[in-house]
Image (cartoon, rainbow, N blue to C red):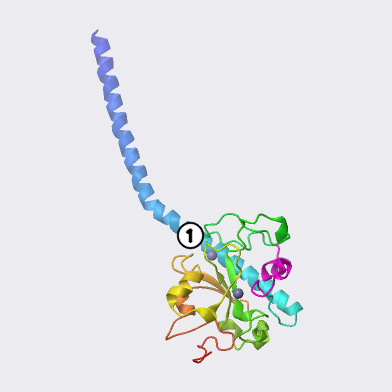
Amino acid sequence: MKNGMGQLRNASKIRAFTLIELLVVIAVIGMLLAVLTPALKKAKSAARKLICSSNVRQFGIALSAYTMDNDQRLPPSSCHLDNPQQYWLHVLARYSDAELLYRCPADASKRFVDWNRPLAEQDEELRWSSYAVNSLTDPGCPLNGGQYNRVDQIRRPRYCVYLCEAPDSWTHYDHLHPEHWGSIEEVKGQIAWDRHDGKSNYLFADGHAECLKVEDTWSWPGNCFWFPDYAPGWPPDGY
Ligand SMILES: [Zn+2]
Ligand SMILES: [Zn+2]
C-alpha cells in the first residue's frame, strides 16, 4: 500500500514535469514559427520574383533570336490579327523551350494555355499568359502605321517597354494600349504592378529585363517608357 502510494505520487510528479516540458516545447515552437514565418514568406516571394524575371529574360532571348531572323521586326499581338498561330505568344514559343515561360509563379491563375500547341485544341477557359506586350510596337498599330514594330526604328529600345505583367483577371488578352492611359490609376488597372512586393517585371525592346515600380515607367512629371517614338520622354501634346 505504502509502495503503491509512492508510485502514484512519483507517476503524477513525472506527468506534471512532462506537461510543463511539453508546454515549454510548444511555446518554443510557437516562438520559432513567429520568427520564421515572415522569413519563409519573404524567401518564397523572392523565389517567385526570381523565376518570373528569369521568364521575362527568356522572352528577351527568344525575342532577340526572332528579331535577328526577321529583319529586326517584332512579332504581332492579337490586336489586329485573328490567327493565334501568328500571335507573339505562339511565335516566340518556337524560339524557346522553357516550360513555364507564360506563367509568373505569383500569378493567382493556375491553368494556362500551352503555346507550343494549337490554341483551338485547348480549353477555352485557359488563361493566355501572365504577360502582355505594348501594342504601340505592334505591326498593325494605326497610331504609327506599324513602323515601331522594328527594333531599329524605336528611338531608344533600352528605354521602351516591350512586355509587362498582365493582371490575374485577364484571360484572353496579350497586349495593352498605353495611348489610352490618362492617370496612374488607369495604368495600375492594366498592369499587375504589385505582383512582386510593390513592383513587377518589365522586358524592354533591347531585350533587357528590370523589376520596377509602375510609377518609374509612367509618371508625370517624370519618365514614360511606353511610346516607342519618344521613350523615355513623353510624347508632345496632341499625340
Ligand atoms: Zn488592341
Ligand atoms: Zn511576375
**Nearer to us in this view, 108 or 32:** 108
Please report the residue visible at 49 percent of the width from the left and 57 percent of the height from the top.
44
Judge from the rendering whether residue 172 lies leftward or rightward of residue 4; answer left or right: right
Q: Nearer the viewer, residue 195 or 18?
A: 195
State whether residue 196 is above or below residue 155: above
Q: Residue 210 occupies which quadrant of the picture?
A: bottom right
Magenta-colored stretch includes residue 222? no
Q: Nearer the viewer, residue 21 or 161?
A: 161
Residue hosting label 1: 45
Based on the displayed image, in which of its 4 quarters is residue 183 positioned?
bottom left
Q: From the viewer's perspective, is 71 left or right of 229?
A: right
Is residue 98 shown above or below 20? Answer: below
> Which residues, given as a range, are shown in magenta?
77-97
Residue at (46% x, 71% y) in the render:
188
Q: Amino acid at mark 1?
A: Ser
Q: Quadrant of ligand 2?
A: bottom right
Q: Is residue 91 left or right of residue 49?
A: right
Q: Residue at x 30, y 25 (%)?
A: 15
The quarter of the image holding the N terminus is: top left
88 in magenta = yes
Residue 4: x %, y % from top left:
27, 11
